[in-house]
Image (cartoon, rainbow, N blue to C red):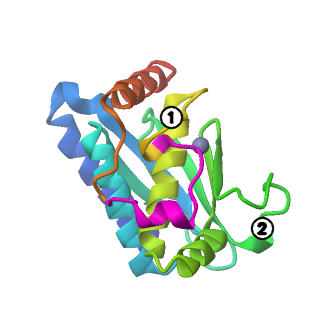
Amino acid sequence: MKKALIVGMIVLAGWAAREGKGSDKKDLFVVAYHNYAGVPPEVLQMTQTDVAMIFDKAGIELEWVALPVPGHDTGPAVYWPSATPMCFLRLMPDSMLKPFRRSDDELGFASGPNVYIHAEHIQRLADRAKFSSAKLLGYIVAHEIGHVLLGGGGHSSAGIMRPKIGPAALLHLEWPVQSFSPAEARRLSDGLLRAWLSY
Ligand SMILES: [Zn+2]
């Protein structure tokens, strides 16, 4: 109960701040997430900071809203501002992947406003590459949220929207320098505007 209220208050505070900005309202995007994989809070915090930075560079402000995980959290439904473009992010453990996963290499995918992140698989990949799991998780989360806003054909040959990543690529991953390209940032902005207009 207490946790849900705090989340609601954070969202409301962010909303109020944006109301004061007037025309900037459209660049707010809510990421409501379920941490089914039990990603530790400190890892999640780093991931959220990195992803927020990536989208901030592209002119979009992210608002994170933790949704309850059945069996772990209790409380009433979490509040977020209505009529706000949003996606639903699920951090998935291996045990929940069977109905969703389409290949062994897949680290995550997006379908409409729904984002599925293979959190335990990402953790193993990061461990093998001796790379920060928080940063790799952030990279994948940013990529998949990118798909939500970019729509079809979101991949590019370089940057955050390249379709494949492996241990070798991690060595060259400049973080958090990598973000969306200026052209992608414009398409993200268009995607957000479309989402606003659909409400
Ligand atoms: Zn992709």
Is 13 magenta? The answer is no
- Residue at the spot x=85%, y=57% of the render? 99
Q: Answer left or right for 59 relative to 150.
A: left
The magenta region covers: 161-175
Q: Residue furthest right?
A: 99
Looking at mark 1, is its residue's CB closer than 8 Å to ligand 1? Answer: no
The Cα atoms of the two marked residues, 1 and 2, are separated by: 29 Å
Specify the label residue 156 is tagged with: 1
- Looking at the rendering, which quadrant does residue 171 occupy? bottom left
- Amino acid of disc 2: Met
Which numbered disc flags the more N-terminal residue, 1 or 2? 2
Horizontal and vertical percent position of residue 26: 32, 29
Q: In this view, does 61 lie above or below 67?
A: above
**Residue 38 can be seen, yes or no:** no
Which residue is label 2 attached to?
A: 96
- Classify residue 92 by image quadrant: bottom right
